[in-house]
């Protein structure tokens, strides 16, 4: 039973490029969450999605960031025109309901 | 979600029990206590959660005081692999906003050989 799969594990982008982070939830899970962890800080909630719907994006920056969870395929967190401040670890979690969240290993984004 | 207070760091000798405290004096009646841990560079790992009764699973035990204002996570026989940051989080289970986990700074547990 595979856990939450995130790829890539490491992503390097130059300023102004786009970053696409992918997350495949655990089998049977229809709830996906994205969290960001800046260096030396705690994890911060970004967005919560169910299949084809954004339920809560209150933690997502208003510009350049978007997320989707299509009917088929993984959830995608997209960051356009990356800046150095976007460098962070991005974690995806999934759940079957509201109790336990299971986290992936994260994507470390480095912006040069 | 209610705010929690944890010591920033703790040491524990390998093989001994690690007791990690958490204060949550403003917890509401419908809020659960959750514990997660994050081993360096990895995603957070669920450990245990409870409402008011003590809970035990294969990883740990959770002791919640009768007034629910504090709790203790117990790792019965700490190993070097238990070195991690441990987060105590209170949240409602179900309903609007229940999915957001508010991570504080946690307790950095160092297991010493």
Image (cartoon, helix red, strand yellow):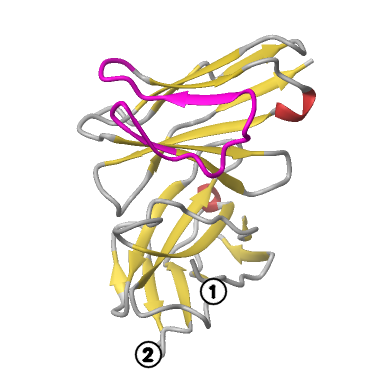
Q: Nearer the viewer, residue B78 or A32?
A: A32
Chain that bears disc 1: B
Residue at left offset 63%, top offset 11%: A18
Horizontal and vertical percent for residue A96? 24, 42
Q: Are marks 2 and 1 on the same chain?
A: yes
Q: Secondary structure at mark 1?
A: strand
Looking at marks 2 and 1 on the same chain, the residue that comes earlier in the sequence is marked by: 1
Residue A57 belongs to magenta span: yes
The count of marks equals: 2
Horizontal and vertical percent for residue A71? 26, 20
Residue at left offset 36%, top offset 24%: A69
What separation in Å lies between label 2 and label 1 (alpha carbons)?
A: 14 Å
Image-quadrant location for residue A85: top right
The residues colored magenta run A48-73
* Left or right of B53 in this view: A65: right
Horizontal and vertical percent for residue B32? 37, 69
Image quadrant occupied by the C terminus of chain A: top right
Q: Which residue is mark 1?
A: B22
**Image marks 2 and 1: residues in contact by CB distance under 8 Å:** no
Q: Farthest bottom residue?
A: B67
Q: Which mark is residue B66?
A: 2
Q: Farthest front residue?
A: A62
In this view, A37 is above or below A18: below
Horizontal and vertical percent for residue A90? 57, 31
Q: Nearer the viewer, residue A44 or B48?
A: A44
């Amino acid at each position: 039973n595979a856990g939450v799969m995130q790829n890539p594990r490491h992503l390097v982008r130059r300023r102004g490029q786009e970053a696409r982070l992918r997350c495949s939830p655990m089998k049977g899970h229809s709830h996906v969450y994205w969290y960001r962890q800046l260096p030396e800080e705690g994890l911060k909630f970004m967005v919560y999605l169910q299949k084809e719907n954004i339920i809560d994006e209150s933690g997502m920056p208003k510009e350049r960031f978007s997320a989707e969870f299509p009917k088929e395929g993984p959830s995608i967190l997209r960051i356009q025109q990356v800046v150095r401040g976007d460098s962070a670890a991005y974690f995806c979690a999934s759940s079957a309901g509201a109790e336990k969240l299971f986290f992936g290993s994260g994507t470390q984004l480095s912006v040069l | 979600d209610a705010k929690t207070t944890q010591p920033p760091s703790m040491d524990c000798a390998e093989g001994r029990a690690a007791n990690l405290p958490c204060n949550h004096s403003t917890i509401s009646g419908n809020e659960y206590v959750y514990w997660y841990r994050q081993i360096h560079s990895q995603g957070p790992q669920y450990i245990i959660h409870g409402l008011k009764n003590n809970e035990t699973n294969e990883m740990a035990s959770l002791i919640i005081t009768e007034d629910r204002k504090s709790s203790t996570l117990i790792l019965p026989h700490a190993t070097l692999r238990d070195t991690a940051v441990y987060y105590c989080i209170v949240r409602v289970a179900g309903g609007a906003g229940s999915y957001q986990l508010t991570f504080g700074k946690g307790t950095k547990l160092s297991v010493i050989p």
